[in-house]
Image: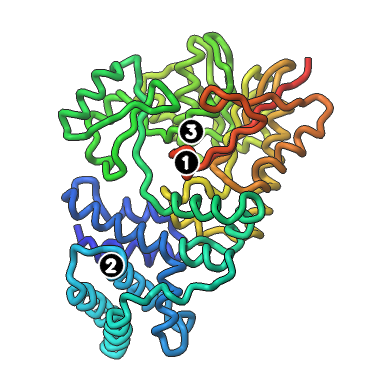
Amino acid sequence: MMDARQAALEALILVSKGSWLDRAMEGLVPQHAPTADRRLAYNLAYGVTSQQLVLDHVLDRFCRQGVASLSPLLRIILRLGLYQLIYLDRVPDYAVVNEAVTQARQRLGQPMARVVNGILRNVLRNKDQLLTNLPSQAAKRIAIEFSHPQWMVDHWLERWGAEFTRQLCLANNQPAPLSLRVNNQRISRKDLVAKLADCGIEARSSSWDSNMLVLPATTAFSDLPDFGQGLYTIMGEASALPVQNLDLKPGQNVLDMCSAPGGKAAYAAELVAPGTVTAIELHKHRAAAIGETVQRLGLENVTVVTGDARNAGKLAGRSFPRILLDAPCSGSGVLRRKPDIKWRYSRQDIEQLTRLQRQLLEAACDCLAPGGFVVYSTCSLLRWENEDVVQQALCRSDMASVPVTIGGDQHQYGNLFPSVHGIDGFFIAKLQKEV
């Protein structure tokens, strides 16, 4: 494995060219790498990505022609060095500067190495005053201070006000814990807790699902024991709630319209057995991953169909009493897990997503049996992808809104926030087809 800082730099370069951060890191940092190296590489790559806007704000003060004048690679090298100077304290400042200078020299030549040295040493001379010039206007200040896109902050401010938005952005910058759903067909929750403890991993029970365990945010996938034996599946706590709201019973048949990576389909399959789950996925490699998941868990009542869920009626060939549509979305509720989402989407991109979401929900309503339920969910905290999409579906004369249950309480819609509920941001709606 390459040096942790080198791996982080390579990953950030790949992300700047369009790669997803998690996939870039998987390719650069192998599972067998030493734990300390893995954690440092992930800390650097995810930290720089999450704090990108505030890092650029600081750098802009120390670049003669502004940060926008820098080449993409030079900007990444400076961000990586600056992140360590501001947010990490285990490495001496001089060592951070020397590493950044070396990276610049190796990739951009000696003149750019001198530029990096000058900028970062100037930063160090002003280290106590780096964030003293934030804008006074609330939206701009929150966007820079918490490193979120301006358009996203504007939307949240309009909906929930300044203090709620500040707390939400703060929570989005914190590392998320790892959670597991126990496969009771192969191991009890108690025995899995003991097995994890034997590996030095402390697990606590989830407050949202009695069959889930929550592990520390520092837990790496490579730390987990016996994954291949199908004792558990990795699944966010919030992801269990849409399945819970389907009110599933043994013998029912369920359609999971946008199924990858398959955790919700597996959960539903356990609840409805000997009923079945039909899992639709657009991409062949992701459909294959669903098949691998259900096979690993020992589930025999899941059928995986590759195709466009907007044609769910033709693909499935029948109607269903229960349908789950966990729609493709911006992912604005899972920024603490995928910080590169902040910079991947624009407001215009969201408009394209909402068109797809409306088409998918329309297809779900068409496939729904009379009296049946469709649960629509996203990991988004944007009204355009959530309430607005559902309201259009409710314009149909045969569809009605049904309350969702969150933490034992009923709501018109389920809105979950990392800053309020301690889990991923999620939206859940439930619709029923009239008989």
Residue 178 percent across, percent down from the top left? 34, 38
Disc 3 residue type (three-letter): Ser
Q: How far separated are the C-alphas under marks 1 and 2? A: 27 Å
Numbered label attached to residue 424: 1
Q: Eyeballing the image, is 123 above or below 381?
A: below
Residue 158 percent across, percent down from the top left? 66, 55
Disc 2 residue type (three-letter): Gln
Q: Is residue 313 left or right of residue 133?
A: right
The residue positioned 64% from the left and 53% from the top of the image is: 350
**Front of the two marks 3 and 1:** 1
Residue 45 percent across, percent down from the top left? 33, 60
Q: Eyeballing the image, is 6 above or below 273?
A: below
Label 1: few (<14), some (14–19) or many (≥20) C-alpha neighbours in 10 Å? many
Q: Are marks 2 and 3 in contact (CB under 8 Å)?
A: no
Numbered label attached to residue 239: 3
> Which quadrant would the C terminus be assigned to in this image?
top right
Q: How many marks?
A: 3
- Dot placed on the residue nearer the N-terminal end, 3 or 1: 3
- Dot placed on the residue nearer the N-terminal end, 2 or 3: 2
Numbered label attached to residue 84: 2
Q: How far separated are the C-alphas under marks 3 and 1? A: 8 Å
Q: How far separated are the C-alphas under marks 2 and 3? A: 33 Å
Numbered label attached to residue 364: none
Helix, strand or loop status at disc 3: helix
